Amino acid sequence: MRTSQNHWRRVTRFLLPISVLLSVGCGGSGDPGRGIPVSGTVTMNGAPIEGANVTFLNDTFAGFARTDASGRYRLVQGALPGTNKIVISKLEGGVESIVYNLKFDMDSEMDAGQMDAAAMGVGAKVNMPRNLFPDEYGDPGRTRLTYDVPKNGATGVDFNL
């Protein structure tokens, strides 16, 4: 039981910062749409990266986008003018695997401990999501990427990782 409690604590510690980051990028600032347009392309060794998360961060606002099959992105709410930290990530594994591997009725009235026991009882393998990019791009505290957003916005803000 202690192992399963520790597991869910690790999952919570991992998912909480992601949910906070996404909520800030989705209007958590209280003033949705106040950013200015920013778009570009994300590539790795010249090849487009599909499904990468691109986030422009400053002290008060986060703009978020996901790349398409051509590696192109457009920030949903834009970004604020000035220097922004750029975080580019692509998660693999994780939550989908947790849900897929659990074999019990989610509508039942099980508490967290019973759900852990049920998951362990069917041999569920829990995958923690992992970022496919190194921390120098994908970790908000370690990213080396920055971009000085001009007051009128920008197109062609490309990142070749």
Image (tube, rainbow, N blue to C red):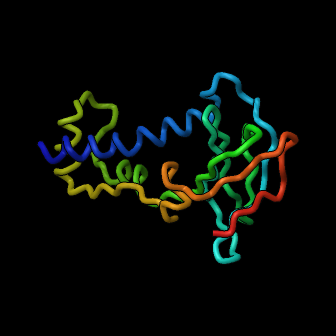
Question: Which residue is drawn at the image coordinates 23% and 48% (left, top)?
Answer: 119
The tally of labels here is 0
Residue sitting at 65 percent across and 22 percent down? 30
Image quadrant for the C terminus?
bottom right
Residue at the image position 50 percent from the left and 35 percent from the top: 20
* Residue 110 percent location from the top left of the image: 23, 31
> Where residue 13 appears, x then y in whole percent?
34, 41
Q: Which quadrant would the N terminus be assigned to in this image?
A: top left
- The outermost residue toward the top is 30
In front of the other: 79 or 99: 79
Q: Nearer the viewer, residue 150 or 21?
A: 150
| Residue 145 image-quadrant placement | bottom right
Residue 8 x/y as whole percent: 27, 42
Against 26, is 56 above or below? below
Query: Residue most toward the right?
Result: 152
Horizontal relation, residue 147 to residue 105: left or right = right
Q: Is residue 69 above or below residue 14?
A: below
Pinpoint residue 4: horizontal percent, then vertical percent: 18, 45
Q: Answer left or right for 63 relative to 112.
A: right
Instruction: Please indicate whether residue 21 sits to the left or right of residue 37 in the image.
Output: left
List the single residue furthest toward the bottom. 45
